[in-house]
Image: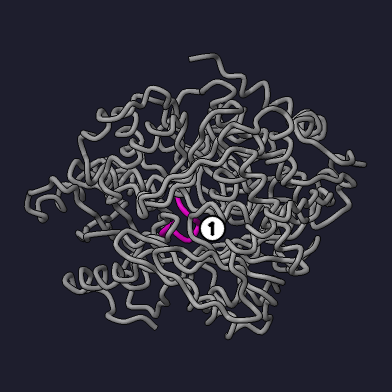
């Protein structure tokens, strides 16, 4: 292992943040350089690269075509659910983006206009993002298949001039018709978009509404045939590139804004220094373009860095089996995979011995990155043992756009500490405060906060909601950004994220982390996945309840397994943990991005009113949870 330069680089940022980011910004093409690297008197807490002009599409596409990468693959589309594969060189990618930008331009889309992209995992979704960026328009990607009501709230909040969508999305075993959802959302919305551009998929077509709907293929082919050229429009570095609404919102959604300049600087820097990726290499983030990981590490970061990015339409298991990920890595020569721990738990459940792995040539594969939720040590160890490569947990948020803490591969790996997503990255002064806003000693659980200002690439505010931004993130701990996560920092400055602050439970006056209990429960050899939530108790206030999904190979009596799990938690954490109830379920309820819906599980267990989460992957799982709880004398049968 090469010696890490991390401490040297982190200290250089701390000594002079503006000089640090100005040097990083040299990797970006600017139409005009900045007046100030950081303008403390602008925006809510200051703005990065004030006065600069730039274009994200130019940096992600055009400059690579001009500098010798025209024939290199920019995007590989791999869709096991449709049996489709297609590779686009940077030159082909640019042609697709320019053609769509011409169509958008013909519909009156210009700098500052908003465009909603409501798409499945198809190349046209990525072309749409870059076409908006080319024109200086602001895109807002809404996860494909969101219910009409959720889409309508986002249409009303950002008032798009136009929507780009598709006739359908494909899930394993089912086709989801998007067009009725889109039409329903527009009918509900107060703000009516003028036009919709629709990709007709062969699996399920749709009727186009005359005068409003435009066929994607016909219109872009016409633009290509006419030889249309659409130059990149320079925008202010501080102008918004996109709005991304945080998952799980109800009522008025929170629109996270990402600017152009700081976003490019942060993502370009991260690819080399944090992820250890060279230009020209194949990078795969197995996420969805509707989430922040998809924005940052399927689309923008790999393209800004001159890499080949993989767009995957499928699941880690069942398309067709638990070897799907290894097939994609082998076939396309991916050097790194970035996915959620939940994907690996699913693979581990189906193939506990990793028997699919040796069937594929993974000789180019060198790093696995996990993020999106806590990576329990057992899953990390399983992946390390089976793959024989470093497994790097890291932690960040929709709001930050790139990792807050990580083990920085490009700077030389630090020793891995299981349960920790690494150390703070340059730009982030991470601290732990108690509820009164006072610092706590090393190793003490508290509120994870970041000292202001946030670095380039983070949200400068919420869309048309500065006051809400203050209330949600800045007011509780003045001078700091509130992450709403709970954790601690050890004596070597490793960060441990233990739970959302809502997931810290109070058992007879003891503040306990559900994440710490989950780590222990996951060590049991028969447990594939687990979640621990706090449920109401008349005597102790709250007590933990463990939900476990067993490995496919587990055959023993569950009462025995339950006793062993309870004993394991008592041994590792102590009697204070008070875990006395473990419930076997078939599946954990999750969002489509893989986050476990612990709050909903808790409400069902506590017999409280609950609403169906907008982002849930499969609503039927909550019925399974309800039935399992009722069998143990807990829970409620219906939602509010």
In percent of width and height, residue 64 lies at 69, 34
Picture residue at 20% right of the left edge, 68% below the top:
628
- The residue under the point 47% across, 45% down is 77
Frontmost residue, 606 versus 440? 606
Question: Which residue shows up at 68% across the image and 27% down it?
Answer: 68
Picture layout, residue 140 above or below residue 605? above
Residue 434 visible in rendering: no
Residue 460 lies left or right of residue 545; in this view the side is right
Q: Is residue 486 above or below residue 406?
A: below
Give the percent coordinates (x, y) of residue 122: 50, 54
Location of the C terminus (image quadrant): bottom left
Residue located beneath label 1 in the image: 290
Circle 1 sits in a helix, a strand or a loop, which is it?
A: loop
Percent x, y of residue 623:
27, 73
Q: Residue at x 41, y 66 (%)?
A: 616
Identify which residue, 102 or 125, lies in the foreground: 102
Q: Position of residue 380 (x, y in %)?
A: 36, 35
Which quadrant holds residue 251? bottom right
Colour convention of the picture: one colour
Give left or right: position of 436 versus 617.
right
Residue 131 shown in magenta:
no
Q: Looking at the rendering, which quadrant does residue 634 occupy?
A: bottom left
Relative vertical location of residue 67 with respect to residue 196 in this rendering, above or below: above
């Amino acid at each position: 292992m090469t010696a890490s330069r991390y401490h040297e680089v982190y200290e250089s940022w701390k000594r002079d943040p503006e000089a640090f980011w100005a040097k990083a910004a040299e990797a970006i093409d600017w139409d005009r350089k900045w007046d100030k690297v950081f303008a403390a008197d602008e925006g809510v807490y200051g703005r990065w690269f004030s006065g600069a002009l730039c274009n994200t599409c130019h940096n992600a596409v055009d400059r690579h075509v001009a500098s010798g990468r025209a024939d290199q693959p920019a995007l590989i589309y791999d869709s096991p659910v449709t049996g489709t594969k297609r590779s686009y060189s940077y030159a082909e990618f640019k042609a697709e983006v320019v053609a769509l930008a011409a169509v958008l331009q013909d519909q009156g889309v210009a700098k500052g206009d908003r465009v909603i992209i409501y798409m499945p995992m198809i190349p046209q979704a990525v072309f749409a993002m870059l076409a908006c960026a080319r024109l200086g328009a602001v895109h807002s990607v809404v996860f494909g298949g969101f219910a009409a009501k959720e889409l309508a709230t986002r249409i009303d909040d950002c008032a798009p001039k136009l929507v780009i969508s598709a006739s359908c999305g494909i899930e394993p075993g089912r086709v989801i018709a998007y067009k009725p959802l889109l039409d329903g959302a527009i009918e509900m919305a107060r703000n009516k978009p003028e036009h919709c551009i629709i990709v007709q998929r062969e699996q399920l077509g749709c009727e186009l509404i005359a005068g409003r709907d435009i066929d994607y293929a016909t219109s872009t082919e016409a633009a290509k045939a006419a030889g249309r050229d659409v130059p990149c429009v320079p925008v202010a570095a501080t102008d918004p590139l996109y709005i991304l609404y945080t998952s799980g919102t109800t009522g008025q959604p929170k629109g996270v804004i990402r600017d152009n300049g700081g976003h490019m600087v942060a993502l370009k820097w991260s690819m080399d220094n944090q992820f250890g990726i060279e230009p020209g290499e194949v990078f795969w983030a197995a996420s969805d373009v509707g989430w922040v990981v998809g924005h940052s590490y399927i689309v923008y970061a790999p393209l800004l860095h001159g890499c080949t990015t993989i767009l995957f339409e499928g699941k880690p298991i069942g398309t067709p089996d638990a070897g799907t990920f290894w097939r994609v890595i082998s076939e396309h020569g991916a050097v790194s995979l970035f996915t959620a721990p939940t994907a690996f738990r699913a693979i581990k459940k189906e193939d506990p011995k990793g028997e699919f792995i040796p069937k594929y040539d993974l000789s180019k594969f060198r790093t696995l990155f996990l993020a999106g939720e806590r990576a329990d040590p057992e899953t990390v160890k399983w992946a390390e043992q089976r793959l024989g490569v470093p497994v790097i947990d890291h932690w960040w948020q929709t709001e930050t756009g790139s990792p807050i803490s990580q083990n920085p591969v490009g700077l030389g790996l630090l020793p891995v500490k299981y349960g920790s997503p690494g150390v703070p990255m340059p730009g982030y002064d991470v601290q732990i405060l108690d509820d009164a806003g006072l610092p706590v000693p090393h190793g003490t659980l508290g509120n994870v906060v970041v000292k202001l200002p946030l670095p380039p690439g983070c949200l400068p505010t919420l869309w048309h909601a500065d006051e809400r931004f203050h209330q949600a993130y800045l007011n509780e701990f003045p001078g700091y950004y509130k992450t709403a996560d709970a954790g601690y920092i050890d004596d070597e400055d490793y960060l441990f994220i233990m739970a959302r602050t809502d997931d810290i439970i109070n058992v007879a006056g003891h503040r306990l982390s559900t994440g710490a209990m989950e780590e222990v429960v996951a060590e049991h050899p028969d447990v594939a996945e687990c979640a621990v939530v706090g449920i109401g108790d008349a005597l102790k206030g709250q007590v933990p309840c463990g939900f476990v999904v067993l490995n496919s190979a587990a055959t023993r009596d569950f009462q025995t397994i339950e006793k062993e799990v309870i004993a394991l938690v008592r041994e590792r954490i102590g009697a204070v943990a008070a875990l006395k109830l473990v419930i076997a379920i078939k599946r954990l309820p999750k969002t489509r991005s893989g986050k476990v819906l612990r709050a909903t599980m808790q409400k069902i267990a506590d017999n409280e009113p609950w609403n169906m989460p907008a982002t849930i992957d499969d609503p039927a799982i909550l019925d399974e949870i309800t039935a399992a709880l009722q069998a143990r004398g807990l829970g409620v049968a219906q939602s509010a």
